[in-house]
Image (tube, rainbow, N blue to C red):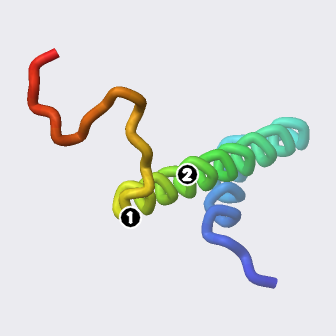
Amino acid sequence: MLTRVTDTIIEELIDATCGDTRSRHFFLHALHGLVRVAKAEQLQEMRMDVELATGEVSQPEGCDTDSREAT
C-alpha cells in the first residue's frame, strides 16, 4: 500500500506527542482535516493564478485597468 508523506509525518507527530488512544484519534483526524483544507486552499490559489495568467479574471464594474487617474 502506498503511503503519502503527510500520513507518515502525521503518524510521527502523533507518536511523539500523544499517549492515550482518545488523543491519538482526535489529533489524527484534526491533522488530516488540516491537510485537506491546505490542499483546497492551494488548489484555489492555483486556479486564481491560471485565471490571472490567461486574463480570465473579470474586473469589478467601473474599474479600468488602464486608468492612471487619481481617485
What amino acid type should be assigned to the residue bearing mark 1? Thr
Q: Position of residue 17 (x, y in %)?
A: 67, 42
Q: Is residue 49 above or below residue 23?
A: below
- Secondary structure under tag 1 reads helix
Percent coordinates x, y for residue 16 in the rendering: 65, 49
Depth order, front residue of 23/67:
67
Q: Is residue 43 above or below residue 19?
A: below
Name which quarter of the figure residue 52 lies in.
Answer: bottom left
Q: Nearer the viewer, residue 32 or 53?
A: 53
Instruction: Determine whether the residue tagged by mark 2 lies in a helix, strand or loop.
Output: helix
Cα separation, mark 1 vs mark 2, equals: 15 Å
Give the residue drawn at x 31%, y 31%: 63
Residue 31 - label? none
Q: Who is closer to the viewer here, 67 or 19?
A: 67
Query: How many neighbours does mark 2 have within 10 angstroms: few (below 14), some (14-19), or many (20 or more)?
Result: few
The residue that label 2 is drawn on is: 44
Q: Residue at the top extreme?
A: 71
Q: Nearer the viewer, residue 25 or 16?
A: 25
Residue count near mark 1 (Cα–Cα under 10 Å), binned few <14, some 14–19, many ≥20: few
Q: Give the mark nearer the N terminus: 1 vs 2.
A: 2
Residue type, label 2 = Gln
| Residue 29 lies in quadrant | top right
| Vertical side of 21 occupied by 7: above or below | below
